[in-house]
Image: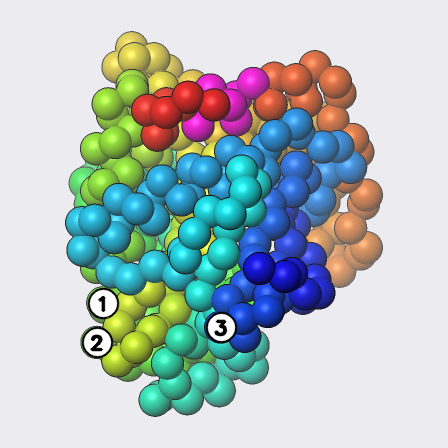
Amino acid sequence: MDMGEMLYQGKVKQVWSTDDPDLLEFRFTNQISVFDQIIPSLIPRKGETLNRTTAHWFKLVEEAGICGTHLVEVNAPDRCLVRKVEVIKEPGMVPRDAEWVFVPLEFIIRHYLAGSAWRRFQRGDIDPTVLGIEGEATYGMKLPNPLVEVTTKFEAYDRFVDREEALAISNITEDEFDSIIRAALAVDEIIEAEAAKNGLIHVDGKKEFALGPGRKVVLVDTFGTLDEDRWWDAEAYAEGECVELSKEFVRQHYVDTGHQAALQEARDTGAQDPPIPALPQSVIDETAALYASMYERLTSGTF
């Protein structure tokens, strides 16, 4: 198949046209991003791990009959062909009868109190009752029920929205919205079971969806990887320790160096984002090794 032109350069992948108007090619890069900033350091073979991990999950989701997916085929270790979906960025403008159309929201499902949810909880931005927590909350605790959160997709920075605003932005029906939530939770059940086979805990993750033929739910983009999701080592967790096996480990580097605080202050005051420094070689090597080993633990395959 002849590849056309690059249509989109994202933080970690490129989207290319093909000679079939209904198909696109995803090319995964070795770039890594945190806090909506692309780090000026490359992680060897990272793109390949993302592509192959996502393809693994798509296959399991389709076999389980949870929902459709847009994956057509993996045509190279770091590339795949996907069914094209129409992307309408203007809030509320997705037609109610459109098919193969992107739902302009991100769906985040949290199973444990960690990451940004913990930071927001500490600031008082999340009410304990929303989390279903009675009594004292501690970092890393398992939530009684999964917390489903929705954010914007096409604003300068992702912003949490309630159900009402999510419906207004996406212009989908209540039933369609609920179908997406059900699919996202069912996908996470598969991920949790698979990850547990190799001593992993699936902490949280984000997913994106489209509506396909007959407005049925279709899972799109990448998910269940180190970039979209957070993972802990189950053995360490059983002993009371949350050992990060995800991109949180890179985020933590920038928290420790003070960059995250400086960035937050700039964004809170409307100042320009400070440029993100490159990673030290030791962190690059450690990150590359983590992506490779996690591919094997998530898929039970060899890298």
**Image spot of residue 73 (x, y percent):** 43, 52
Taking depth in this image into account, of 98 and 238 the one nearest to the observer is: 98
At horizontal 30% and vertical 46% (from top left) the residue drawn is 59
Residue type at the position of mark 3? Asp
Query: Residue 265 appears at what percent x and percent y?
Result: 71, 47
Looking at the image, is mark 2 or mark 3 earlier in the sequence? 3
Task: Quickly name the residue at label 2.
Answer: 175
Magenta stretch mostly in which secondary structure? helix
Q: Amino acid at mark 2?
A: Asp
Q: Which residue is mark 1?
A: 179
Rendered residue at 37%/15% (across/down):
241
Is 193 on the left or on the right of 230, as rendered? left
Pointer 1 with pointer 2, Cβ within 8 A: yes
Q: What is the number of the mark on residue 22?
A: 3
- Image quadrant holding the N terminus, namely bottom right
- Of residue 238 and residue 278, the one placed in the foreground of this image is 278
Select label 2 or label 3 by which is in front: 3
| Numbered range of the magenta stretch | 289-295
Q: Is residue 17 something one can see in this rendering?
A: yes
Q: Secondary structure at mark 3?
A: loop
The x, y position of residue 86, in whole percent, is: 50, 76
Whole-angstrom CA distance, mark 1 to mark 2, is 6 Å
Lateral position of residue 150 relative to residue 44, left or right: left
